[in-house]
Amino acid sequence: MQPVVEIRNLAKSYRRGGQIVPVLTDITLDIQRGEFTALMGPSGSGKSTLLNLIAGIDKPDSGHLRVGGLDITALGEGELADWRSRNVGFIFQFYNLMPVLSAFENIELPLTLTRLSRAERRERVELTLSLVGLSDRKDHYPSELSGGQQQRVAIARAVIADPVLIVADEPTGDLDRQSAADILAMLQRLNAELSTTIIMVTHDAHAARTARRLIYLDKGELMLEPPTI
């Protein structure tokens, strides 16, 4: 079976003042469809940069990156934006919800780019609200929801269009312990029951243990033997 993510000899650097600072060096990695993978590493190790490259938010300096069989390094900016909207669901640390939209409307937003009818969109949103346990909060605005509830809305928005993969950048970093546990349990459930492919960046060893696979980065390189967590 072809991996959902195929990375070959990937490198990325950034210009800082007059210097070029390498962030990722010669990364080669496969992620299988249906895997729940955690990316760990110290600050500055390149884990968020790698996540952004996989999600098509940024482009590498060299190497190849295929997602769902498509070499996304060959896409132009417009093509990449269109590809992201159809193939990647995003979960961020600070939720990134639209404050003027209700929970229902935030979740529905990705579907407005599809050809689904209004009735079909409503049915799918109602099912997804039920999946994340927020049917009774669908008309509430983000300011009326707790942090954990806002993150559940963000998860629902990420999965609503059935993307190829979900990328989560520190999804529990702004939550209390119980809310964080609830969110991690929800991600595990999505992975186990729906075979959702999830790639999660985290600095939290407890969060990383909920994933089925751990990838550890240090100074922009993959560690052959990740530290015990």
Image (cartoon, grey):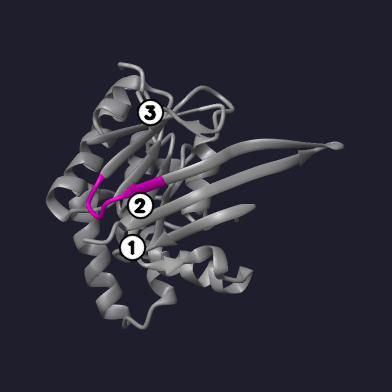
The numbered dot on residue 163 is 1
Callout 1 crowding tier (Cα within 10 Å): few <14, some 14–19, many ≥20: some
The relative height of residue 127 versus residue 218 in the rendered view (above or below) is below
Callout 3 crowding tier (Cα within 10 Å): few <14, some 14–19, many ≥20: few
Calculate the distance from the C-alpha at mark 2 to the C-alpha at mark 1.
Answer: 7 Å
Calculate the distance from the C-alpha at mark 1 to the C-alpha at mark 3.
Answer: 30 Å
Q: Which quarter of the rendering shows the C terminus?
A: top left
Residue 174 visible, this orientation: no
In reply to whether residue 31 is colored magenta, the answer given is: yes
Decide which of tag 1 and tag 3 comes sooner along the chain.
1
Decide which of tag 2 and tag 3 comes sooner along the chain.
2
The relative height of residue 108 versus residue 180 in the rendered view (above or below) is below
Q: Which quarter of the rendering shows the N terminus?
A: bottom left
- x and y percent of residue 175 in the render? 39, 28
Callout 2 crowding tier (Cα within 10 Å): few <14, some 14–19, many ≥20: many
Mark closer to the observer (1, 3)? 3
Mark 2 sits on what residue? 166
Mark 3 sits on what residue? 224
Rendered residue at 51%/22% (across/down): 42
Rendered residue at 16%/55% (across/down): 194
Which image quarter: residue 105? bottom left
Tell me whether the residue at label 2 lies in contact with that at label 1, contact meaning CB atoms closer than 8 angstroms. Answer: yes
Calculate the distance from the C-alpha at mark 2 to the C-alpha at mark 3.
Answer: 25 Å
The residue at the far left in this view is 193
Of residues 195 and 32, which is closer to you in this image? 32
Part of the protein shown in magenta = 29-35
In reply to whether residue 192 is colored magenta, the answer given is: no
The numbered dot on residue 50 is none
Rendered residue at 35%/65% (across/down): 68
Of residues 127 and 62, which is closer to you in this image? 62
Q: Secondary structure at mark 2?
A: strand
Rendered residue at 27%/71% (across/down): 122
